[in-house]
Image (cartoon, rainbow, N blue to C red):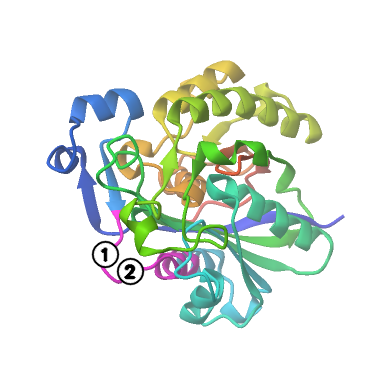
Amino acid sequence: MTYAAIIGIGSYLPERRLTNADLECMVDTSDEWILSRTGIAERRIAAEGEATSDMAARAGTVAIQDAGVEPGKVDLLIVATSTPDMLMPSAAALAQAKMGLTCPAMDINAACTGFIYALQLAASTIESGRARTVLVIGADTLSSIVDFTDRTTCVLFGDGAGAVVLRASKDPGVLGVHLGADGTGADMLMVPAGGSAAPLTPERMAAREQFMVMNGNEVFKFAVRRIPQVTKQALRESHLGVEDVDWLVPHQANQRIIDTIADRLGISHDHVVSTIRDTGNTSSASIPLAIDALYTAGRLRPGQTLALVGFGAGLTWGAAIVRWTKEEDV
């Protein structure tokens, strides 16, 4: 049987740091309040003129180089994003040109769960024999849809991109993925205007409907209930148990959510990857950024099992169980 395994990884974070002290000058908040409730100290913000496709291309290029793959050998590019450069063409098409690729390219939008959705699609394409090498990128410029006058949301989000290269392998890499969605919860986290249902007008812009709105309490309750369930389901489908997980790599939404999920799964916090203090919530980029941080720190070893778990607008959720097969760079 043909499996899909990760052979390369890369990430990109913009240079500009927006600290809690900076936010204290913008809205009625404090460093202590933000840290105690979210675990975030700073987040990265894209430079003027820096778009999602730019960040995706930079992370993707690093991943391709890390994998030792020629650009012409990439068979498919999938970019998970909620913040494409424009409605059309796709961020993937724009990033493809910037990386010098010639393969098919497409976006997928499952909000903060987007990377796991894209990973499932990439693995399935490889396992079916339709492709041998697939580049998956999670990239978001959330600063473009955040209302920086709303203290409940502007403290949470940042920009960035993370990427992995998957290739056909005889050794199992992506062991199992379980996905879910419930559109009845769409109003918990959304951008009200800017699509076909409510095109942007001067009136809607004056009402700030082009920005994200969120029911934080409901999202919290949804996440800490649903993510332990889907993680256990994905583990069962991979013929593993919670005790087999070496690293829990959750979507970096809120440190309290991360800690609660780990506690409900019975996973020690020493085995949970958290990068949220320095990046904030980067949506579809957060999981690959966290994997890359673990890898570059030298803490990720071949043979270890990762549980990648995410949730987001839609509502969407998912868990992917991955056996790390990439050898360490010497």
Report the number of numbered marks. 2
Is 102 displayed left or right of 85 in the figure? right
* Residue for badge 2: 50
Residue 77 horizontal/vertical position (percent): 62, 69
- Residues in magenta, as a range: 45-61
Q: Is residue 50 magenta?
A: yes
Mark 1 near mark 2, Cβ–Cβ under 8 Å? Answer: yes
Tell which of 241 and 196 is nearer to you.
196
**Residue name at image x 34 percent, y 51 percent:** 208
- Kind of residue at badge 1: Ala
Relative to 210, say whether 185 is above or below. above
Residue 150 horizontal/vertical position (percent): 29, 40
Answer few, some or many: residues within 10 Å of disc 1's Cα (few below 14, many 20 plus, some between 14 and 19).
Answer: few
> Residue farthest to the front?
203
Query: Which SS class for mark 2?
Result: loop
Let me know if residue 36 appears in the view.
yes
Is 200 displayed left or right of 264 in the figure? left
Let me know if residue 266 appears in the view.
no
Q: Is residue 208 magenta?
A: no
Tell which of 193 and 47 is nearer to you.
193
Report how far apart the C-alphas of labels 1 and 2 lie in the structure.
Answer: 5 Å
Relative to 267, say whether 83 is above or below. below
* Residue for badge 1: 47
- Kind of residue at badge 2: Glu
Q: Which mark is residue 195?
A: none
Is 118 displayed left or right of 164 in the figure? right
**Residue name at image x 87 percent, y 55 percent:** 1
Residue 260 horizontal/vertical position (percent): 50, 20
Tell which of 116 and 150 is nearer to you.
150
Query: Which SS class for mark 1?
Result: loop
Answer few, some or many: residues within 10 Å of disc 2's Cα (few below 14, many 20 plus, some between 14 and 19).
Answer: few
